[in-house]
Amino acid sequence: MSKKSCNYLFFTKVSDRTPLGRLFNEVFEVLNIPRGASAPDTTTDNGWMNSEQALVFYEMCLLEKYLHSIIDNLSEWLSLTKKYANEFQYSWKYFAISHRIDLINEFGGDENDYNDDGSIRTDFTDEELIDYTIVTELANPNFRSIFLSTTPVNCLNSCLMISYLGTNCIFDFLKEKTGKPIRTFRKDEHGRLVENDWMDEAMQKAENEIAHNKIADMFWSVLLNVYALLERVKKLPKTEDNMVFFQGLPKLIDQIFNLKIPIVKLPEIDREKN
């Protein structure tokens, strides 16, 4: 059987090498357990009848798509912002007219897009340019996009799952199911495998919990920051230059990519419920 048929068992990691990209890949690494466990088994009825399993798998797939979209869209925002500054000197109308003319040249326009001599009009009204502004280009409300529609709450279960996996070791789960202790090992200073005793395992569990909570909190903080930035863009007036905002946008995006953002811990009440 071809291994390609099982590719959906695993996340596709992001290729971005920034701290943000590394964080997202750490999230994928932690969530590989629920991703693989919830993936449908096409040789049985599990993939067809188990709605709870299907929901977890669906959430994992959506999360994967969303995290890739964050990298792609923020990178595109950065490129467009630099273009807006360098080529259009922060003029919303200059950008919008140029954008509309480019689209007319590429795809053709309506009859009222042309002058009597067949040339493309340049005296468009503000209303005619609304759909071609830099703000619309960044966050078009008429465009179906997981990046534009996702909220941090949509990803909260995944954040809580990361934290949960830090406090609930897979070996404890297997011990509970089998009734037998699972032997674990570590490498000593000479590179030899040494079986862990109870103190080693306790220390590893404590370190694992701390590491998972750190990833979960940082991930939650990124989601909040991305959403807050997106909401700011959506609220910008489309027929204004918004120069001050766009002058500062590259720095805001850079802070997200480099994780230089305020850390917000996951809601404690939700952790307890989970």
Image: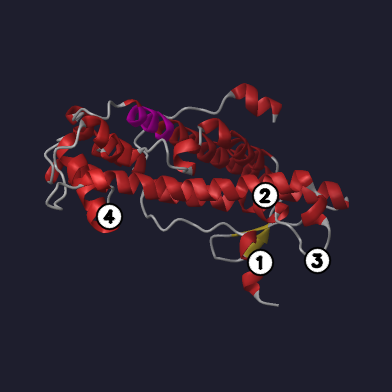
Closer to the camera, 256 or 228?
A: 228
First in sequence: mark 4 vs mark 3: 3
Q: Which residue is labeled 4 in the image?
A: 108
Given the current orientation, which residue lies at the most extreme front position? 116
Label 2: which residue? 57
User: Nearer the observer, disc 1 or disc 4?
Assistant: 4
| Kind of residue indicated by mark 2 | Phe
How far apart marks 1 and 4 lie (CA) works out to 44 Å
Q: Say whether marks 4 and 3 touch (CB < 8 Å).
A: no
Prevalent SS, magenta region: helix
Real-space Cα separation, disc 4 to disc 3, in angstroms: 51 Å
Q: Secondary structure at mark 4?
A: loop
Image spot of residue 188 (x, y percent): 58, 60
Alpha carbon separation for disc pair 2 and 4: 43 Å
Q: Which residues are magenta?
A: 226-234
| Relative horizontal placement of residue 80, taking residue 22 as reference (left or right) | left
Residue at image mark 3: 43
Left or right placement of residue 53 versus residue 130 in this view: right
Please tell me which residue is depicted at 81% across the width and 55% down the height of the picture.
Answer: 46
